[in-house]
Image: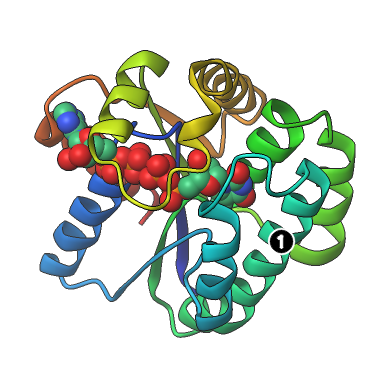
């Protein structure tokens, strides 16, 4: 694929969305064509699935059903948004991608890691060129996410324990794939975090 595929990962409230937006703005100002997108969502069909998975009671779906819904959303996002943008040579910045499924459905919500990997190989089959992991203390992340509260609170409602497991899981994943991941300390002023993110992205451009 011709373009560059970047993803942002991290626990809820780590500052991913803020950093994805800042990076998109900076790269556009530098003259790059940027496709700034997000998961779950990023295409019409996937945004419809987003409502199903992020709203409602925490026990609304089993982790198995969630895995299928997130994967269906990702496949649509890939077909309709990511692949076409990469084919046009754009920089794709996705706020979450497959690592979120590895962590949330594979590790913290259930023990589905093997199934997650098999389904990924079967249905998705691509990885970002660079994944920026915004790392933050789970308590700080959860307090930021809860302060921002809206309708999409299903995962935040699962509590601190899920965030702690997710943070450890993301750090382990980054350790296992050092060539793809950059871990950046998110417990600093947004502009300081953004400078490190820009340096990591620029190195791949
Ligand atoms: P995420 O997408 O990881 O859930 P957001 O970017 O939406 O995180 O940030 C969560 C909340 O924390 C928002 O209210 C945002 O304004 C705030 N926030 C983001 N980055 C920082 C930062 N570096 N320092 C303090 N607050 C931040
Ligand atoms: P997101 O909108 O990124 O929330 P936040 O800005 O609070 O980080 O994602 C919402 C939730 O969806 C988040 O708690 C993680 C969860 N999620 C999964 O469980 N699996 C997935 O594959 C994805 C993409 C997200």
Whether label 1 lies within 8 Å of ligand 2 gets the answer no
Query: Viewer-proximal residue, 94 or 69?
Result: 69
Query: Viewer-proximal residue, 81 or 130?
Result: 81
Can residue 104 be seen? Answer: yes
Report how many numbered discs are placed on residues in the image: 1
Question: Where's residue 12, x and y in %?
Answer: 41, 35
- Mark 1 Cα shell of 10 Å, populated few (<14), some (14-19), many (≥20): some
**Residue at figure coordinates x 50%, y 82% from the top left:** 44
Note whether 12 is above or below 186 in the view shown: below
Question: Where's residue 171, x and y in %?
Answer: 55, 20
Question: Where's residue 118, x and y in %?
Answer: 89, 49
Which type of secondary structure does the marked residue at label 1 adopt?
A: helix
Can residue 16 be seen? Answer: no
Q: Report the side of 129 relative to 117 (left or right).
A: left
The residue where tag 1 is placed is 69
**Residue at figure coordinates x 35%, y 57% from the top left:** 205
**Residue at figure coordinates x 24%, y 19% from the top left:** 187
- Quadrant location of the N terminus in the rendered image: bottom right
Which quadrant would residue 30 be assigned to in this image?
bottom left
Question: Where's residue 190, x and y in %?
Answer: 14, 34
Note whether 36 is above or below 159 in the view shown: below
Q: Report the side of 87 relative to 134 (left or right).
A: right
Query: Viewer-proximal residue, 2 or 152?
Result: 152
**Residue at figure coordinates x 59%, y 56% from the top left:** 53
Query: Viewer-proximal residue, 44 or 132?
Result: 44
Note whether 183 is above or below 179 in the view shown: above
**Colour scheme shown:** rainbow
């Amino acid at each position: 694929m011709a373009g560059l595929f970047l993803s942002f990962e991290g626990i809820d409230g780590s500052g991913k969305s803020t950093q994805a937006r800042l990076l998109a703005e900076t790269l556009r100002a530098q003259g790059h064509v940027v496709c700034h997108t997000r998961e779950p969502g990023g295409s019409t069909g996937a945004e419809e699935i987003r409502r199903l998975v992020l709203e409602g009671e925490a026990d609304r779906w089993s982790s198995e059903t969630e895995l299928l819904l997130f994967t269906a959303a990702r496949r649509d996002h890939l077909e309709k948004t990511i692949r076409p943008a990469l084919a046009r040579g754009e920089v794709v910045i996705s706020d979450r991608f497959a690592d979120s499924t590895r962590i949330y459905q594979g590790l913290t919500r259930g023990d589905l890691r093997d199934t997650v990997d098999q389904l990924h190989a079967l249905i998705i089959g691509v990885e970002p060129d660079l994944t920026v992991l915004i790392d933050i203390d789970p308590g700080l992340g959860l307090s930021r996410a809860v302060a921002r509260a809206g309708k999409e609170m299903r995962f935040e409602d699962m509590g601190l324990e899920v965030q702690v497991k997710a943070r450890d899981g993301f750090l382990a994943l980054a350790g296992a794939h050092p060539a793809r991941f950059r871990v950046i300390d998110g417990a600093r002023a947004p502009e300081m975090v953004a400078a490190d993110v820009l340096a990591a992205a620029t190195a791949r451009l």
